[in-house]
Image: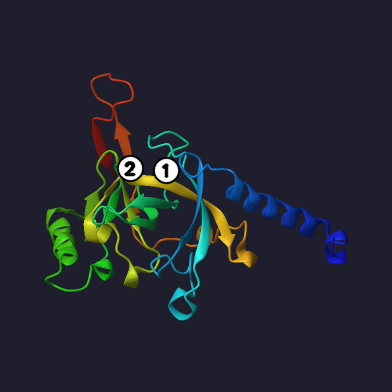
Amino acid sequence: MPPSLLHNPTKFVYTTATLTLWLTIALIPLNDNLIEASFVQGTSMSPSLCPSYHTTGRRDAVLWNKWVDHGNGPKGLKRGDIVLFRSPTRPDCNAVKRVVGLEGDRVLLDPRRRPEGDASPESRAWDAMAAQAEEYSGSRGVVVPPGHIWVEGDYWRKSQDSNAYGPVSKSLVLGKAMLVLWPWELCGTRPWERYRSATRVVEGKSERKGGEMGLVDAITAE
């Protein structure tokens, strides 16, 4: 064992835990139901993930918790979570974005996040959402429907997200980010927790009607 590890118990424990984690992922086939490790590419989640992708092409490896509660309980999705999901517009591809709004929330549209191009399907979808949205505090707000979330990339200039295709069904969510596995110096960390989305969200509340337990019949945003 290297002397540096013997004289630094904390580093020894950290290194041992990291190696154990890598071996667990490599040897146990948990990919389908419990956890999954995958590389993230692109710039849409910069600076939280892949901050130097545009210059070095570096991809970050993330460990995902696939045991995701799609309900509204305490173990469900929360604002600020990073999720892996099937793209609504490209079902053969997965996407990684931040949860900005939950069902019942009113997400105020930011014109800076409007997709580029007046004739593109994405820009037309944004314009349609803005036209149907109600005005709130000088902005147009989209209320996230039941069973959906509003997702956005941290780097708004290069992100294909809910501003292009609207709220995402929770049924498309495949996993929630647990921690970074690579690069080595970030292993075990959650860099996305240092970032705060600038999108304004008015938190909503769920209301049950008809006395049916577990059924959300009406969503209001306040």
- SS for tag 2? helix
The structure residue drawn at horizontal position 27% and vertical position 38%, both measured from the top left corner, is 146
Characterize the local packing of mark 1: few (<14), some (14-19) or many (20 or more) Cα atoms within 10 angstroms.
many
Q: Hey, which quadrant is residue 19 in on the image?
A: bottom right
Relative image position of residue 69 (x, y in whole percent): 42, 36
Residues 155 and 64: in front is: 64
Residue type at mark 2 is Lys
Relative image position of residue 141 (x, y in whole percent): 23, 54
Is tag 1's residue or tag 2's residue first in the polypeptide sequence? Answer: 1
User: Dividing the image into 4 quarters, which one contains the N terminus?
Assistant: bottom right
Q: Which residue is mark 1?
A: 77
Q: CA distance from mark 1 to mark 2?
A: 9 Å
Mark nearer the viewer, 1 or 2: 2
Characterize the local packing of mark 2: few (<14), some (14-19) or many (20 or more) Cα atoms within 10 angstroms.
many
The structure residue drawn at horizontal position 43% and vertical position 38%, both measured from the top left corner, is 76
Looking at the image, residue 4 sits to the left or right of residue 89; the answer is right
Residues 17 and 167: in front is: 17
Which mark, by number, is residue 170?
A: 2
Relative image position of residue 157 (x, y in whole percent): 33, 72
The structure residue drawn at horizontal position 21% and vertical position 73%, both measured from the top left corner, is 116
Do the residues bearing badges 1 and 2 touch, measured as CB atoms within 8 Å? Answer: yes
Residues 36 and 146: in front is: 36
Residues 11 and 129: in front is: 11
Which mark, by number, is residue 160?
A: none
- SS for tag 1? loop
Residue type at mark 1 is Leu
The structure residue drawn at horizontal position 36% and vertical position 46%, both measured from the top left corner, is 173
Q: Hey, which quadrant is residue 187 in on the image?
A: bottom right
Against 96, residue 34 (above or below) is: above
